[in-house]
Amino acid sequence: MFADNYKKMAGTSAVFLSADYNGASPVERDGVFWSAEELHLNAPLTARQDKPPMHNALALEGLEDYDAPEDGDVRAVASIGSEFVYLNSIRAWVQMV
């Protein structure tokens, strides 16, 4: 369900893409990786809650303003072709693989 390592998307504070993602994406180019352990991805999800899809991953950050995410919310992101889950423990969206 999760990758071993992640990169943070540029321009966001809380959206992480798998380090193995090969598509075009605005990830930070500083070479910093976060391990699944550092992102606390070993904790079980409380419950998966499918939400409407988003056009791009940058839109995930704006949700707090009008549809605050809850732990386990899952949104497909069309521009990435993948699903992201919101984890309240790190207050971040993480790509599911």
Image: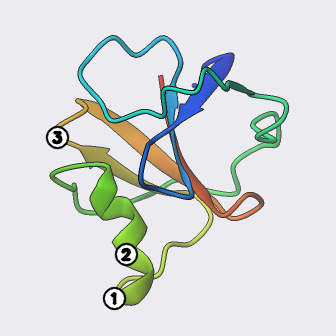
Horizontal and vertical percent position of residue 61? 41, 66
Q: Mark 1 and mark 2 in contact (Cβ < 8 Å)?
A: yes
Q: Disc 3 or 2, which lies upstream in sequence? A: 2
| Residue extending farthest bottom | 66
What residue is drawn where x is 16% and y is 40%? 78
Label 1 SS: loop
- Between the C-alphas of marks 3 and 1, the distance is 20 Å
| Residue identified by numbered label 3 | 78
- Residue 61 visible from this viewpoint: yes
Horizontal and vertical percent position of residue 4? 68, 16
Horizontal and vertical percent position of residue 38? 83, 35
| Residue identified by numbered label 2 | 63
* Disc 3: CA contacts within 10 A as few (<14), some (14-19) or many (>=20): few
* Disc 2: CA contacts within 10 A as few (<14), some (14-19) or many (>=20): few
Q: In which quarter of the image is the N terminus?
A: top right
| Depth check, front residue: 23 or 40 | 23
Q: Mark 1 and mark 3 in contact (Cβ < 8 Å)?
A: no
| Depth check, front residue: 81 or 47 | 81
Q: In this view, does 49 lie to the left or right of 59?
A: right
| Depth check, front residue: 52 or 17 | 17
- Between the C-alphas of marks 2 and 1, the distance is 6 Å
| Residue identified by numbered label 1 | 66
Amino acid type at image mark 2: Leu
Label 3 SS: loop
* Disc 1: CA contacts within 10 A as few (<14), some (14-19) or many (>=20): few
Q: Mark 2 and mark 3 in contact (Cβ < 8 Å)?
A: no
Amino acid type at image mark 3: Ala
| Above or below: residue 71 compared with residue 43 | below
Amino acid type at image mark 1: Tyr
Label 2 SS: helix
- Between the C-alphas of marks 3 and 2, the distance is 16 Å
